[in-house]
Image (spheres, rainbow, N blue to C red):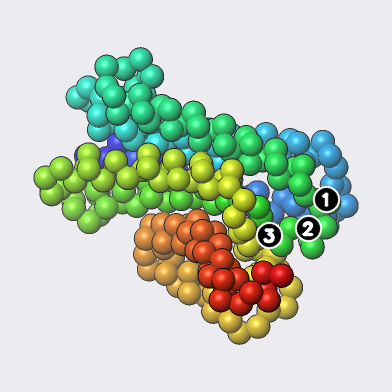
Amino acid sequence: MPVAETAVFGWSTLTVSGCLIFVGMFLDALDGSVARLTRSTSDLGAQLDSLADMVTFGVAPAYMMLRLVSHYYGPEHYTGVLGPDADNLYARVTWTIAAAYICCTALRLARFNVETPSADLEDHRWFRGLPSPGAAGCVASLILLHQHLLVKRFGGEFPPGYEKGSSLLIPLVTALAAMGMVSTMRYPHLINRWVAGRKDFGSLVRIVIPVVMAIWWLQVALAVCFVSYALSGPLGALTRRVRRRRSPSLAA
């Protein structure tokens, strides 16, 4: 069964938490543009923004992952979060993953502040390493999809082992997202590259398709989009490596 319901549309606590992460992601996408439009950018604002991102995209997804694991691998009807001292190897492993994820989020945000020369739009075209909102989106969207399938797809009649088995995927994704944040793989800034300014027809298609998917299958669309974005880094790095091997002139 899904994690305990709340008074918000009868959603589970994890569903509400995931939605709040996406609200924070939307506001985070706007704050830089608003600061530039109002000419109120400052070093202090950048540091406060990083602190907010640390909680929204670091602590919150890690806690959601721990809560999911505790629900399915803790005592029956357990409503808390298993601690690292729990008599459960899987709980201790997920605590280690959660701690590593939060540390990687802090490193990712600190590196961004150091490596980004200014608040100009041209300095925000690409990211070095998976952005913390993208990592949080992978974790949160898959948890949202997990809770959605439990209620809407199966309606309480779950295949044997589905609940516990499917929840095993979330800590693995969290660990991979953590490694992606501290990697050197290149990721595009979606808003600045594909939304802001005048764009061609191809850019319009890349915007419309996810929107149409979200209208019909919101949870599926979120999971597909964020997982695809996370995979774009290693796939892009692999593609560039193959091209350099085939064209020695490009490597020079």
Count of numbered circles in the view? 3
Closest to the observer, 199 or 217: 199
Pointer 1 and pointer 2: residues touching (CB < 8 Å)?
A: yes
| Place of residue 140 in the rendered image (x, y in percent of width and height, measured from the top left) | 44, 46
Which residue does the numbered mark 3 point to in the structure image?
A: 126
- Which amino acid type is shown beneath numbered disc 3? Trp
Name the residue: 74% across, 73% down: 197
Instruction: Name which residue type carries label 2.
Output: Asp
Residue 137 location in percent, x, y? 49, 50
* Mark carried by residue 117: 1
Q: Residue at x 15, y 42 (%)?
A: 161
Reply above or below: 191 against 62: below
Q: Report whether residue 63 is seen.
A: no
Tell which circle, 3 or 1, labels the residue nearer the N-terminal end. 1
- Is residue 163 among the parts visible in the rendering? yes
Q: Disc 3 vs disc 1: Cβ atoms closer than 8 Å?
A: no
Answer yes or no: do the residues labelled 3 and 2 have beta carbons within 8 Å?
A: no
Q: Is residue 189 above or below residue 79?
A: below
Question: Pointer 2: residues within 10 angstroms few (<14), some, or many (20+)?
Answer: few
Marks 1/2: CA–CA distance: 7 Å
From the viewer's perspective, tell me whether residue 148 is left or right of residue 203: left
Q: Quadrant of residue 24?
A: top right
Percent across and percent down for residue 85 are 35, 15
User: Which dot marks residue 123?
Assistant: 2
Q: Which quarter of the figure has residue 79?
A: top left
Image quadrant occupied by the N terminus: top left
Residue in front for this viewpoint, 102 or 185 = 185
